[in-house]
Image (cartoon, helix red, strand yellow):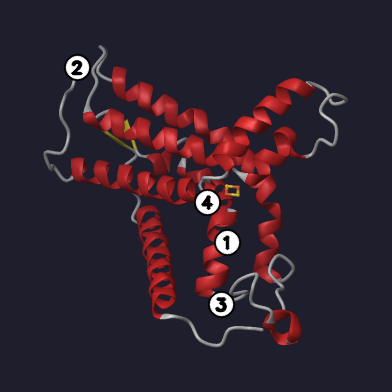
């Protein structure tokens, strides 16, 4: 039987996630359209890495991520509210049509956007390296650690992707018969552990990329947020 009323704590949870989602999307859009300076004191802004021109592809990779889909389908479009909501099966008007209609067909291409996500990962590590040697000699500053933390979180999020899980071993029926069977089985086991935390990684990596961008903007504004460590 479908549930008509929500308990107060469920309303709080829905509102919390809904507003978090909207605020993060708004900050992300603002970070891009306000055009950050590409490089500040040897730090390359993550929104410019490798170049702002290809940003739509990793942007679509994130937009079609299952972790965000769950939130915008449930909390933004109210459609579907959840798997336990049986009313969508009883009422044709409420049947789940995401992934088949208009804009939501894009979600089907998530597995292809994954390649763009994988391709840009090395650039974030290059940016970290560049920040260490930009002055001609080695120097480790707080900002380099911010860039490294962002690169690691983006890597953890990308490699824990459900599409990546399918790519490395999820599409294999018999590991002993498949090419590189044992290695793929081991990889699949490791990735499965990360995959369980994919939603948390999706949100944390969104926070770290926004934080890295804001950190560099604070530097550009002349705020004393950076210091030399080594
Ligand atoms: Fe989240 Fe692929 S499912 S990045």
N-term mark: 1 or 3: 1
Question: Answer yes or no: do the residues labelled 1 and 3 have beta carbons within 8 Å?
Answer: no
Cα gap from disc 4 to disc 3, whole angstroms? 23 Å
Name which residue lies at 58% across and 42% down.
195
N-term mark: 2 or 1: 1
Q: Name the residue beneath numbered marker 3.
A: 78
Point out the residue furthest to the front here: 1
Would residue 121 be visible to someone looking at this image? yes
Instruction: Find residue 59 and name its label.
Output: 4
Look at the picture and state if 127 lies above or below 167. Answer: above
Cα gap from disc 4 to disc 2, whole angstroms? 35 Å
Look at the picture and state if 103 lies above or below 169. Answer: below
Cα gap from disc 1 to disc 3, whole angstroms? 11 Å
Q: Is residue 79 left or right of residue 183?
A: left
Cα gap from disc 2 to disc 1, whole angstroms? 42 Å
Q: Nearer the viewer, mark 2 or mark 1?
A: 1
Name which residue lies at 75% across and 85% down.
90
Name which residue lies at 65% across and 67% down.
103
């Amino acid at each position: 039987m479908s549930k008509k009323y929500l308990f107060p704590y469920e309303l709080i949870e829905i509102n919390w996630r809904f507003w978090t989602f909207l605020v993060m999307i708004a900050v992300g859009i603002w970070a891009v359209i306000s055009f950050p300076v590409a490089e500040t004191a040897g730090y390359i802004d993550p929104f410019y890495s490798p170049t702002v021109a290809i940003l739509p592809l990793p942007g679509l990779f994130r937009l079609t991520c299952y972790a965000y889909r769950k939130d915008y389908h449930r909390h933004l479009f109210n459609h579907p509210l959840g798997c336990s909501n049986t009313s969508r099966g009883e009422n044709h008007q409420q049947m789940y049509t995401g992934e088949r209609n208009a804009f939501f067909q894009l979600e089907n291409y998530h597995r292809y956007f994954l390649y763009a996500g994988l391709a840009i990962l090395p650039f974030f590590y290059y940016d970290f390296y560049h920040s260490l040697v930009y002055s001609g000699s080695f120097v480790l500053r707080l900002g380099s650690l911010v860039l490294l933390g962002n690169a690691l979180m983006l890597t953890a999020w990308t490699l824990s992707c459900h599409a990546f899980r399918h790519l490395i071993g999820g599409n294999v029926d018999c590991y002993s018969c498949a090419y590189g069977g044992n290695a793929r089985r081991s990889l699949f086991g490791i990735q499965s552990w990360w995959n369980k935390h994919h939603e948390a990684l999706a949100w944390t990596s969104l926070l770290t990329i926004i934080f890295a961008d804001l950190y560099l903007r604070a530097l550009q504004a002349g705020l004393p947020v950076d210091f030399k460590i080594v």
